[in-house]
Amino acid sequence: MAITQTVKEAWEANDKVNKVLLEHLTPDMLNAQTPGGGYTVAQHLAHMTRTKKYFGMKLSETLKALPDLHDTTTDRVETNLAQIKDVMRQTSQRILEVSEATDGKGDLPQLSTEGFLIHMMIHDGHHRGQILLALKTAGHPLPDEDLFWQPLNNEYE
């Protein structure tokens, strides 16, 4: 095992926070945009997944087979919530599996496989904040604060 139980549990808690956010979203919310011409919610979600895949492929080329939420040839971003949820789940699950199975860090720029996972969790947190800002400024309701943070407090089922 290339990662500690603590980092694995943090990765899983991060996924649960993402899931709470995804369950809160409606199709209309995916078009909300970060102020100043930033990403839409759908673009943030696609970027979060694509970044994990991009760096993950430096650990294992097998991750290249993961689906994308952003078709770069047409610049189309996925807006089907069921598809977004599935791709985000698959990506996170496969990256954790590959990270656990590897003995080294491959071509990752991070100091270690754990450093890569931590970097991706921080990256997710940054984009979740951007998504919440986009939702708030567009007048959409935000997820319940207690529900949103439960996974990090070991209270999520």
Image: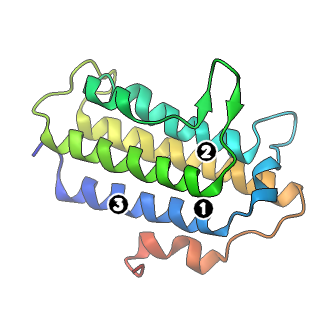
Label 3 secondary element? helix
Amino acid type, residue under disc 3 in the picture: Glu
Q: Is residue 100 above or below residue 15?
A: above
Amino acid type, residue under disc 2 in the picture: Leu
Q: Which mark is residue 13?
A: none
Q: Which residue is mark 1?
A: 22
Q: Are marks 1 and 2 in contact (CB under 8 Å)?
A: yes
Residue drawn where x is 32% and y is 31% of the image: 63
Considering only order in the chain, which callout, 2 or 1, is on the residue closer to the N terminus?
A: 1
Label 1 secondary element? helix
| Quadrant of image for the C terminus | bottom left
Considering only order in the chain, which callout, 3 or 2, is on the residue closer to the N terminus?
A: 3
Q: Nearer the viewer, mark 1 or mark 3?
A: 1
Q: Which mark is residue 45?
A: 2
Q: Dividing the picture into quarters, in which one does residue 91 lie?
A: top left
- What sort of colour scheme is used for the picture? rainbow
Q: Nearer the viewer, mark 2 or mark 3?
A: 2
Q: Which mark is residue 12?
A: 3
Count of number-bearing discs: 3
User: Is disc 3 surrounded by few (<14), some (14 to 19) or many (20+) residues within 10 Å?
Assistant: some
Label 2 secondary element? helix
Q: Is residue 13 above or below residue 54?
A: below
User: Is disc 1 surrounded by few (<14), some (14 to 19) or many (20+) residues within 10 Å?
Assistant: some
Is residue 59 visible from the viewing direction of this image?
no
Horizontal side of 57 relative to 39 (left or right) equals left
Residue drawn where x is 69% and y is 63% of the image: 25
